[in-house]
Amino acid sequence: MKLHAVNTGYFQLDGGAMFGVVPKSLWSRTNPADDNNMCNWAMRSLLIEDGDRLMLVDTGIGNKQSEKFFSHYNLHGNDSLDKSLKALGFDRNDITDVFLTHLHFDHCGGAIEYDSSKDAFRPAFKNATFWSNQQHWNWATKPNAREKASFLKENILPIEESGQLKFLSHDSTFLKNAFPNIDVLMAYGHTDAQMIPHIRYKGQTIVFMADLLPSTGHIPLPYVMGYDTRPLLTLDEKERFMNAAAYNEYILFLEHDSVSECCTVQHTEKGVRLKDSFSFSDI
């Protein structure tokens, strides 16, 4: 099995929204903001090459939204999903499986593209099976008012309409057979039934953190995003996970950290804190 970091681009989000009740004087030490209070964030996917399967975990924001939509997020940098796949010797048609941790637009937007010849949306990976779970799918397709702006129907419904959608469960035979080195932790604080993959790799456990831990700046327990729908539940989930990550020496793959691709954590007198940060290629 081989793992590859796939950089799909960078965008900006409001620092206050990303750190909730934590004062700017604290979070800006690790995540400096511009004059509009906007911080830079990555959209980093993970490619898992295992036998005849090629799984992409999350897809970035894509490129099909309107100019007005993208103007709110200041997409920047030279990375793209296609460019990063090509650098690894692959293209979209090689992907056999797309694992979507959850269906917010910055995680699944690249799963669907616009077909101008048919004036319709279609899967961007024509040979892939798309993996979600029934509970989160129901949550995303009947969104609450708080999350409605993050669950865009053009990113979600065409997956089901294509016939390429399948749901994972805790006893999913496919996952166990096709990707026996992957386990999935379910998390419910950020959004309902977010999936956090744990991958056994080179004798270590790599955890794709999605929005359970967006960046190294979010490691202290109270640093919880304002976007989380159940922040107190996030606190509980995060505390349990971070203690396990420190004890088991997990490598945390950071989807949104604009500087650090990976990190490890350790127990200290102040709680779990950053131990090391490094590039994925250093593993």
Image (tube, grey):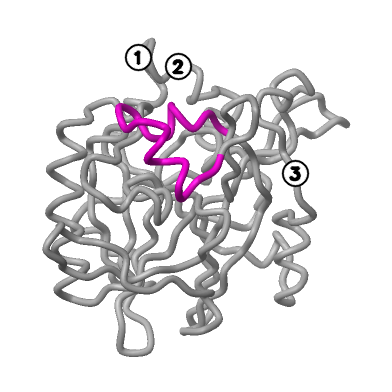
Element type where label 2 sits in the image? loop
The span shown in magenta is: 13-32
Query: Horizontal and vertical percent for residue 277?
Result: 43, 71
Q: Quadrant of residue 247?
A: bottom left
Q: Mark 1 points at which residue?
A: 144
Q: Which of 62 and 126 is in front in this view?
A: 62
The residue under the point 23% across, 35% down is 189
- Given the current orientation, which residue lies at the most extreme top position? 145
Task: Say if the magenta span includes residue 18.
Answer: yes
The residue under the point 22% across, 27% down is 230
Q: Is residue 200 above or below residue 102?
A: below
Q: Name the residue under label 2.
A: 148
Query: Horizontal and vertical percent for residue 156?
Result: 52, 31
The residue under the point 30% across, 53% down is 219
Q: Which amino acid does label 1 sit on?
A: Asn
Q: Categorize mark 1 by other alpha carbons within 10 Å: few (<14), some (14-19), many (20+).
A: few
Marks 2 and 1: in contact by CB < 8 Å?
yes
Q: What residue type is labelled 3?
A: His
Q: Mark 3 points at which residue?
A: 76
Q: In this view, does 178 lie above or below 132?
A: below
Give the alpha-carbon distance from disc 3 to disc 2, as whole Å.
Answer: 25 Å
Q: What residue type is labelled 2?
A: Lys
